Image (cartoon, rainbow, N blue to C red):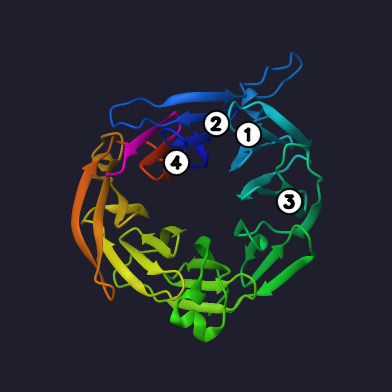
């Protein structure tokens, strides 16, 4: 399974995840001892035609999904795009696009964007996900697959080395150049709606809160850019003993959370100021980092058991309190919880009250304390 999105549920927290042929709506338990409940499932393994000579693995399957207020937008590799109702999973409408080699879905509010590569063209489709089938507008946005793409209030943002293309739903394509020390080969990218006008730095610059694009390069640096103008906002040099490239980067409200295999950082989104940092224990490597409330959580793995012929990787969920006196943020009390051994971790999802880990044939949910 792989995550489709992470909304807030009305009872227990809800997650929507997809495998090759179905989308599942799962309600997580409100107590630590409860079991997850499948609210609905949409899709099944397709029937194999009698004249089909290939491997059934290559029959039509789900390749991307995302959640909007009306439900889940699902893309199949044969080009079908459908909206499934959030409450019961029934098909609200369906569109048909050309089949694609690569494809992604991005959502922002009720707007959804499909990015797909077909032949020598990369095309984008932006649709409003209402109760009726939307008008489809396909646009060619490039000839090579972008190193990253995402949907913001400015439109669909596509990133290539040293340039950004913005595809708005109601306007022409716009290209923005980004200033970097070298061709920006990013290992991780994230973005969020910053409000630097609330800070002294924002008032001095005259910038009003727009979308900030944060990129981690292959040399361990972090860069922040204003999406609308491409202007550089700040650059953060790599911390000492940071290890190799970034393995995780995300924006949470007004914070940037980043991790290499050795070090995690918490920065201010508007200025890049480092608020807190920590390191993995010896022989461990970091997998991900997140902040919930006043607590920073990080996942660390130890592969020594696998090196000695024991199947699986030992994973720990560690956390620490962020304590602030209004001027300086420090690390307070900390804790560590061992998780179930993981044979092949495919992804993680941080919810309000849970951490969900995804493996090829299962998902596990842990309560965040």
Label 3, secondary structure: give it.
strand
Mark 4 or 1, nearer chain start: 1
Image position of 2 with respect to 240: above or below: above
Task: Select label 4 or label 3 by which is in front.
Answer: 3
Residue range of the region highlighted in magenta in the rendering: 359-369
Say which label, 3 or 2, has the lower sequence index: 2
Which residue matches tag 2? 19
Q: Position of residue 248 (x, y in %)?
A: 42, 57
- Tell me the crowding category of disc 2: few under 14, some 14 to 19, or many 20 or more residues within 10 angstroms, Cα based: some
Contact between labelled residues 1 and 2, with CB atoms less than 8 Å apart: yes
User: Which numbered disc, 4 or 2, marks the residue that appears first in the sequence?
Assistant: 2
Q: Residue beneath label 1, please?
A: 62
Q: Is residue 115 magenta?
A: no
**Marks 2 and 1, how far apart in space?**
7 Å
In the displayed structure, would residue 138 be above or below residue 81?
A: below
In the rendered image, the residue lying farthest to the left is: 333
In the rendered image, which residue does mark 3 sit on? 126
């Amino acid at each position: 399974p792989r995550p489709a999105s992470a909304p807030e549920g009305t009872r227990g927290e809800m997650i929507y995840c997809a495998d090759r042929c179905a989308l599942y709506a799962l309600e997580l338990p409100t107590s630590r001892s409860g079991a997850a409940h499948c609210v609905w499932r949409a899709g099944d393994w397709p029937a194999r035609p009698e004249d089909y000579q290939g491997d059934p693995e290559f029959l039509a399957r789900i390749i991307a999904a995302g959640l909007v207020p009306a439900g889940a937008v699902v893309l199949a590799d044969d080009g079908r795009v459908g909206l499934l109702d959030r409450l019961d999973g029934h098909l609200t409408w369906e569109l048909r696009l050309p089949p694609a080699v690569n494809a992604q879905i991005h959502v922002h509010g009720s707007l959804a964007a499909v990015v797909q590569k077909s032949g020598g063209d990369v095309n984008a489709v932006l649709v409003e996900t209402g109760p009726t089938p939307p008008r489809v507008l396909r646009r060619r946005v490039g000839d090579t697959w972008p190193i990253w793409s995402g949907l913001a209030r400015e439109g669909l943002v596509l990133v290539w080395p040293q340039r950004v293309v913005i595809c708005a739903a109601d306007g022409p394509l716009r290209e923005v150049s980004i200033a970097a020390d070298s061709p920006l080969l990013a290992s991780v990218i994230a973005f969020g709606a910053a409000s630097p006008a609330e800070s002294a730095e924002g008032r001095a610059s005259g910038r009003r809160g727009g979308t900030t694009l944060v990129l981690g390069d292959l040399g361990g640096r972090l860069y922040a850019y204003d999406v609308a103008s491409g202007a550089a906002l700040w650059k953060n040099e790599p911390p000492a003993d940071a290890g190799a490239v970034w393995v995780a980067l995300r924006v949470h409200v007004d914070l940037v959370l980043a991790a290499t295999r050795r070090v995690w950082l918490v920065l201010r989104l508007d200025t890049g100021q480092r608020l807190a940092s920590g390191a993995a224990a010896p022989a461990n490597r970091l997998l991900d980092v997140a902040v919930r409330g006043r607590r920073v959580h990080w996942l660390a793995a130890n592969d020594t058991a696998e090196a000695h012929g024991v199947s699986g990787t030992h994973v720990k969920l560690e956390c620490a309190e962020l304590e602030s006196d209004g001027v300086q943020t420090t690390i307070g009390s900390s804790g560590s919880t061992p998780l179930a051994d993981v044979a092949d971790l495919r992804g993680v999802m941080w919810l309000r009250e849970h951490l969900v880990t995804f493996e090829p044939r299962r998902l596990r949910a842990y309560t965040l304390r």
